[in-house]
Amino acid sequence: MRCLSCQKLSFELICKECQNNLLSTSLHTREVDKDFFVYSFFNYSEISELLNAKYHFFGDNIYKILAKNSFAKFASNFTFTNQVYAISIDDMITKEFSHSAILAKHLHSNIIKPYFNVLQAKNRVSYAGKSLEFRKNNKRDFEYSGKKYISVILVDDIITTGSTMLEAKKKLEEYGCDVLMGLVLSDAKF
């Protein structure tokens, strides 16, 4: 096959050279609530087409490449005194895969354990291209079915207004969970 970026022959959808040149990460921080930070790895404008791969059959492979170049590296350098669970926001399977579950899976380490299918939205509304007002009027209405009193990293692919991340955090806190941070591929404001 050919690399999606440079069109050279490659065993992966994005060749190693393009991964090294185009998918280098730099950690960005955004405070979305008092003392609650969401960290992102990529400039949205540089990977927006790759993020949209979640709507296509080959998207899982793109998300695996993005996760390997960001989330996996983060996990290998993350230190904490207790076990931490990576909970993906609404990891429902669509288009044959869950993009947020792929990201959480790549956080696996001695300290971080991915925890799947425990935070699901009852309201299946799409926020893509919608205003903040629409988001506020159409909450996800999350259900949590996981362990209580655990330390958590919330995982998603992109943050725009922060409303989904904050709603998920609030739901987990109702169960005594300590939400340490949010972790996303990209911040749309960056």
Image: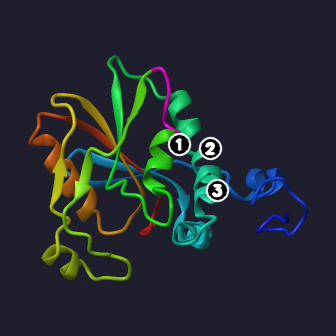
Residue range corresponding to the magenta coloring: 106-110
N-terminal of the two: label 3 or label 2? Answer: 3
Could you say which quadrant of the image residue 174 lies in? top left
Which secondary structure lies at badge 3? Answer: helix
Looking at the figure, which quarter contains the N terminus? Answer: bottom right
Give the residue type that dot 3 points to: Asn
Counting from the top left corner in percent of width and height, residue 37 is at 31, 48
User: Marks 1 and 2, Cα distance to the nearest angstrom?
Assistant: 6 Å
Q: Report the label total.
A: 3
User: Marks 3 and 2, Cα distance to the nearest angstrom?
Assistant: 11 Å
Q: Nearer the viewer, residue 180 or 4?
A: 4
Which secondary structure lies at badge 1? Answer: helix
Q: Are the residues flagged by discs 1 and 2 in contact, CB closer than 8 Å?
A: yes
Counting from the top left corner in percent of width and height, residue 151 is at 26, 30
Residue for point 42% across, 28% down: 112
Counting from the top left corner in percent of width and height, residue 183 is at 41, 48
Give the residue type that dot 2 points to: Lys
| Residue 68 - label | 2
User: Marks 1 and 3, Cα distance to the nearest angstrom?
Assistant: 15 Å
Q: Residues within 10 Å of mark 3 (few under 14, many from 20)?
A: some
> Which SS does the magenta portion mostly show?
loop
Counting from the top left corner in percent of width and height, residue 143 is at 16, 52
Q: Residues within 10 Å of mark 1 (few under 14, many from 20)?
A: many
Residue for point 52% across, 66% down: 54
